[in-house]
Amino acid sequence: MPSDYLVRFAQVHDEFRIPELLSVSELFKFKIGLPPKIDTSRALMILSLDSEEHALILARRCILIKSVCELYASGTTYEEIHEQVRRNHDKWSRYIPDTSFKFSVTGYANAIPQDRQLDVINSFRWMDLRGKIDMKNPEVTFVCHEEYLYIEGDRVRSLHDGNFIAVHFGRLVLDGSARPLIRTFSVKTREYYGNTSMDAEISLLMANQALAAPGRLIYDPFVGTGSMAYTCAHFGSLFIGSDIDGRQMRGKDSSPGIIRSANQYGVTSRILDLLTMDVTQHPWRVGGLFDAIVTDPPYGIRAGAKRLGRKKTRETVTERVQTFIATRESDQPYVPPTKPYELSELVSDLVLFSRAMLKPQGRLIFFLPTVTEEYEEVDIDTMLCDGMEVIANSLQDFGNWGRRLITIKKCTDESYPPPMLRRTSEVEIHDGDGEDTGAHIPAHKDFRVKYFQGFKKSVP
Amino acid sequence: MVRLITHNLLACHAKGCTSNNFPLQLKDVQIALREADFNPDFVRGFMPKIEWNALVNAARQLGDSSLPAEQPEMIDDDLLKALHHVLLEIHIEEGQMTCPNCNHVYPISNGIPNMLLAEHEIA
């Protein structure tokens, strides 16, 4: 029989909570009953789960979960709570005779004064728990959680004590044990990182979206300094990374930087390989290789996207090659020229590439920067192709721009040959006044230009 | 790094190089052996993607002859273990991979292969 569980989330990344829950439940193959109405402004959520084992899995794996409780009662007054707890007697009666316990009375958006905490605890005296009270290592912890509307200003807030919008009572299953990983993978204490390294919390969330687990192979075609490699490998996945710029992966020492950080986290044996290559001119012999592709494509703010090729110049290519051959020192490594890669084009290429390289049911997880005011749902559709479906889209809001973590699933068993993403026309960065072809132009097109113009509306 | 699993997945992709472009020939290689977690399901799941002859030849060139020349029909534990070792525990640290068709040289340094093409080799 399914029971209700109260999940308390960290007060961050609210749009990432449900996708993370669903990913973890898909990975461990169980069902989650979500509430009929989801209010992401509230950090508490009641889930219906088939077994306590599932609650434990969520608390151990979800980065955004602070705690999970088995719910005995939920209401707007303490009278309702007491009544429901009484009715659910069989859920907690086994703790009556001889189980050490403690009570914890907490509030969201309000610190409850100690004397009132005591009042609340004493009001549950009728439960007649006979075990001894143990504040340090109790066998069972009963949790009473008051939920308040968030109000600015501490002084005003303290006047509202007792004026909660909801109160919940239950038994603590587990404090979220994945959350401390944010500290473990902190970029600050990492052996090797760069100015584009992804922060630890998001890297962990991306690993969960990728269903990282032993035996699964995950690929990042813009691996940079490898932030997602460590978190995916931590959860047991094998990982391949590639980047057009080998210096990002190597750093200055002779031992590659990504390997040094992987050593620090004890995941080196799961970093399968690192390659210097261009995803638009890639050497993969076959497709259908990866369980997930996880990446943060460069979108031109801190690092610009590049592909092999040369910007349009008056000189012809053959002339260039001849000059190059004539002037190259024989002992110098050859560094091929690169040209800019416009974001909306990069993104649709990435989806096409992923469709070929992913296994059926494989996932593509990547960040898409968007201009908040201009973003429309259809922007996402412009980059999709047959067989690729968006299953999650979570905004991280930075004010007038934001980035969306997009999760796309390959919903087809068909195999596609690895595409070579060749364009007949030259790609140039232009200032947004593209030719009108009638097709929808997504708001992330020419994102770099818009960013550096401060997202001002262009004057016609 | 450049484990043999990766070597088995890389083909020359220079412009016009579409046949006889696999496997890349190993030259002047330095290898290292490093233990990896054995996951039989992963190895079994990966077998359909493997080019058997290329793998056996590369392994033999690097001094490992644990794999039979013909891909056996029966997949037993011993075979999975041998495959695991060949695919995941032999690392090429330095050396070159050369395309048998167009002779493009892909150098490997500190375990990272450079798969970039020159300007006249891209489409």
Image: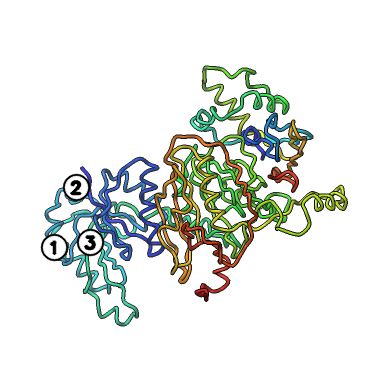
The amino acid at mark 3 is His
Residue farthest to the bottom?
A155
**Do marks 2 and 1 both belong to one polypeptide chain?**
yes
**Left/right of residue A121 with respect to residue B63 in the rendered view:** left
**Left/right of residue A75 with respect to residue A457 in the rendered view:** left
Is residue A185 positioned above or below B113 on the image?
Answer: below
Question: Sequence order check: which comes first, mark 3 or mark 2?
Answer: 2
Q: Which residue is mark 1?
A: A80
Coloration of the structure image: rainbow
Q: Position of residue A18 (x, y in %)?
A: 35, 54
Where disc 3 sits, the SS reads strand
Q: Which residue is mark 3?
A: A168
Q: CA distance from mark 1 to mark 3?
A: 10 Å
Nearest the viewer among A115 and A13 is A13
Q: Looking at the rendering, in which quadrant would you find the N terminus of chain A? A: top left
Which chain letter goes with mark 2? Answer: A
Labels 3 and 2 touching (C-beta < 8 A): no
Nearest the viewer among A15 and B78 is A15
Nearest the viewer among A317 and A175 is A317
Q: Position of residue B44 (x, y in %)?
A: 51, 28
Where disc 2 sits, the SS reads helix
Q: Position of residue A71 (x, y in %)?
A: 23, 54
